[in-house]
Image (cartoon, rainbow, N blue to C red):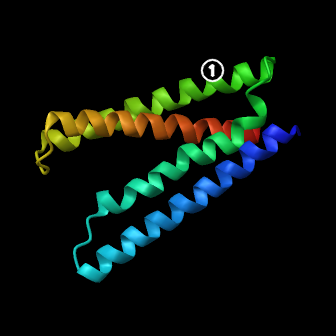
Amino acid sequence: MKPSEKISKWFLIALMGIIGLWGLSRVISQLQHGDVGWIAALVPFMMLIPLYYNLMVFPHWDRKDERWRRITERSAFCSSQILIVALAVLITVLASNPTDWTALQAVFGIFVFYGLTHTVTTIVLTKRM
């Protein structure tokens, strides 16, 4: 591993630690005030997933081999299939109208869900293939 790769790896680990501590401090401060907003508390922890993705797939970025191409293709396919199922569930839930989501909140939720799904499937496929 090159020195620059080691520095990048340790930088990502340090950043994950800092964001993890930030998330814990947000949850603790919300618990102390008695007002726990689960969306606001979840944001730092959701930021850890893309950082973990960068840490796991960092060694594979420079490769132009068949394995990496298959991983990205399968990841896109799997995450799009999961998104289609999630959209069907979202339509069913919103059709029965138990939430007061606006269209903008639903679209943002879809984008975040797809990004996190694609990230997680790429990590899983990188480990399995």
Identity of the residue furthest to the bottom in this view: 32
Residue occupying the point 59% across, 54% down: 15
Residue occupying the point 44% across, 64% down: 23
| Residue 31 in view of the camera | yes
Q: Position of residue 21 (x, y in %)?
A: 51, 67
Q: Is residue 42 left or right of residue 107?
A: right
Q: Position of residue 100 (x, y in %)?
A: 11, 48
Q: Quadrant of the N terminus?
A: top right
Residue occupying the point 37% across, 68% down: 26
The residue where tag 1 is placed is: 73
Between 85 and 129, the one lying in front of the other is: 129
Q: Is residue 36 left or right of residue 117?
A: left
Which picture quadrant has residue 89? top left
Residue occupying the point 59% across, 56% down: 16
Residue type highlighted by circle 1: Glu
Q: Is residue 28 left or right of residue 11?
A: left
Between 14 and 117, the one lying in front of the other is: 14
| Residue 129 in view of the camera | no
Identity of the residue furthest to the right in this view: 1
Between 46 and 10, the one lying in front of the other is: 10
Which picture quadrant has residue 114? top left
Crowding at dot 1, Cα within 10 Å, few <14 / some 14-19 / many 20+, comes out as: few
In this rendering, is residue 33 above or below 109?
below
Q: Position of residue 82 (x, y in %)?
A: 46, 34
Secondary element type, mark 1: helix
In this rendering, is residue 76 above or below 32?
above
In this rendering, is residue 64 above or below 52?
above
In this rendering, is residue 105 above or below 67?
below
Q: Quadrant of the C terminus?
A: top right
